[in-house]
């Protein structure tokens, strides 16, 4: 059994349990939700594995709720009736930190399920960042960068070969110490189960062949603002483009399983007259899913350096999302019709934000820094000055350049 590694989510869960009655942890299967929640719970019910516990929800709920708190209801969506009962318990007891629910799928909307506002805090949990898996030193803190602090870091400990493996293996807790061949087999089975088991369990009928074509199309679209109309051409295959409703339903299903994690368009005030592109940039919740769906490993990534750069970007964006969550911040992208773009804009509040370019090749840092400075010049001052401009790269020495742009090796970035 893989030893538990401390997660950034551990601290966040403690904080949430301190101010609200119930916390719902959402995220993809195998991201570590159950393991983390278990460490904070006094009583555990695994609803996906325990038919007796599912029966008690209706027949004798007091047998569930009469246990020491916090009480964990793992995979709550298997027995959705537990939601209203937990909500009622929170209302009746008027206490904090009573319940933890985990879910790897969001159930369909149910008019009988009451709002959890004021009772539930919803917390996302993604696969592990490089800092959590021990592959980043965390010397360069995202929080401190957004506070305007100057920092240094050395990312040379993370070799190029190891970085490639981190893209292919991903941040799944079960795979942190796995070799590449074992990880690829695990990921192949993971995708198969998603298509053949998890999606049908949601109660929606989907053609497995079309689903696989969509997943492969998304894998080819990582880091790009690919529209649904383009995806429809791949999903339909030889029969022509799939219907828009079909593609939208498929994308919604993947979102409900927390497998996709797109970057929405950042919409600041701009002096530039260039039309902003508002299509979301496509990402999976973990960079490993792209190579897995395309059937490539480290050698295959090396054969296409442009694609490798996009999959590296997916890894960086995943880590930024994990670190940004501790700040209650969001990660967006920015692109205009003239081809100008910023890979990640991290927004903490209405006037506190930072912009980051992602470059696999350290030789491209000068070009990326110049692009960020042009971007800064185009932002209306009503948006506020950026707290940080940074180029996140694969290796090397991190620090602040004379032009005010931070260089951040991914092996030095942390929360």
Image (cartoon, rainbow, N blue to C red):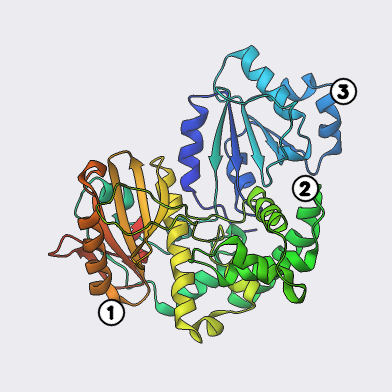
Q: Is residue 153 visible?
A: yes
Q: Position of residue 378 (x, y in %)?
A: 23, 56
Q: Position of residue 376 (x, y in %)?
A: 23, 56
Kindly identify which residue carries mark 3: 59
Q: Of the residues under marks 3 and 2, which one precedes in the sequence?
A: 3
Instruction: Categorize mark 3 by other alpha carbons within 10 Å: few (<14), some (14-19), many (20+).
Output: few
Figure quadrant of residue 205: bottom right
Q: Which quarter of the rendering shows the N terminus?
A: bottom right
Residue situated in front as seen by the camera: 339 or 94: 339
Tell me the mark number nearer the camera, choosing from 3 and 2: 2
- Vertical arrangement, residue 164 with respect to residue 190, above or below: below
The label number, if any, that marks residue 363 in the structure image: 1
Q: Secondary structure at mark 2?
A: loop
Q: Residue at x 22, y 68 (%)?
A: 370
Q: Of the residues under marks 1 and 3, which one precedes in the sequence?
A: 3
Q: Position of residue 384 (x, y in %)?
A: 23, 43
Figure quadrant of residue 406: bottom left
């Amino acid at each position: 059994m893989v030893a538990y590694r401390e997660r950034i989510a551990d601290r966040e869960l403690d904080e949430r349990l301190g101010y609200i009655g119930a916390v719902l942890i959402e995220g993809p299967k195998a991201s570590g939700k159950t393991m983390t929640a278990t460490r904070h719970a006094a009583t555990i019910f695994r609803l996906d594995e325990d038919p007796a516990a599912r029966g008690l929800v209706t027949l004798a709920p007091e047998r569930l709720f009469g246990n020491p708190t916090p009480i964990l209801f793992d995979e709550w969506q298997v027995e959705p009736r537990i939601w209203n009962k937990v909500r009622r318990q929170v209302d009746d007891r008027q206490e904090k930190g009573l319940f933890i629910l985990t879910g790897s799928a969001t159930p369909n909307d149910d008019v009988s399920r009451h709002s959890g506002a004021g009772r539930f805090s919803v917390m996302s949990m993604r696969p592990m960042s490089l800092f959590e898996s021990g592959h980043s030193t965390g010397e360069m803190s995202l929080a401190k960068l957004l506070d305007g602090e100057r920092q240094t870091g050395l990312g040379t400990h993370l070799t190029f070969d190891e970085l490639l493996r981190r893209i292919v293996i991903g941040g799944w807790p079960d795979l942190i110490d796995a070799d590449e061949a074992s990880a690829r087999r695990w990921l192949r089975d993971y995708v198969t189960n998603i298509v053949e088991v998890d999606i049908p369990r949601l109660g929606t009928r989907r053609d497995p062949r079309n689903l696989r074509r969509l997943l492969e199309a998304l894998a080819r679209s990582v880091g790009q603002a690919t529209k649904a109309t383009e995806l429809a051409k791949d999903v339909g295959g030889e029969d022509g483009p799939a219907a828009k409703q079909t593609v939208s339903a498929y994308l919604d299903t993947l979102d409900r399983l927390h497998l996709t994690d797109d970057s929405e368009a950042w919409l600041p005030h701009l002096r530039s007259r260039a039309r902003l592109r508002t299509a979301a940039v496509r990402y999976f919740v973990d960079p490993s899913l792209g190579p897995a769906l395309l059937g490539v490993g480290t050698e295959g990534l090396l054969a296409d350096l442009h694609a490798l750069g996009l999959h590296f970007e997916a890894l960086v964006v995943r880590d930024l999302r994990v670190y940004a969550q501790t700040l209650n911040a969001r990660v967006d992208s920015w692109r205009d019709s003239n081809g100008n773009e910023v890979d990640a804009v991290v927004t903490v509040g209405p006037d506190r934000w930072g912009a980051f370019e992602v470059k696999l090749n350290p030789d491209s840092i000068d070009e990326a820094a110049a692009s960020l400075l042009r971007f800064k010049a185009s932002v209306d001052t009503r948006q506020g000055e950026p707290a940080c401009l940074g180029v996140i790269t694969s290796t090397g020495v991190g620090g602040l350049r004379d032009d005010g742009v931070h260089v951040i090796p991914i092996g030095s970035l942390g929360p």
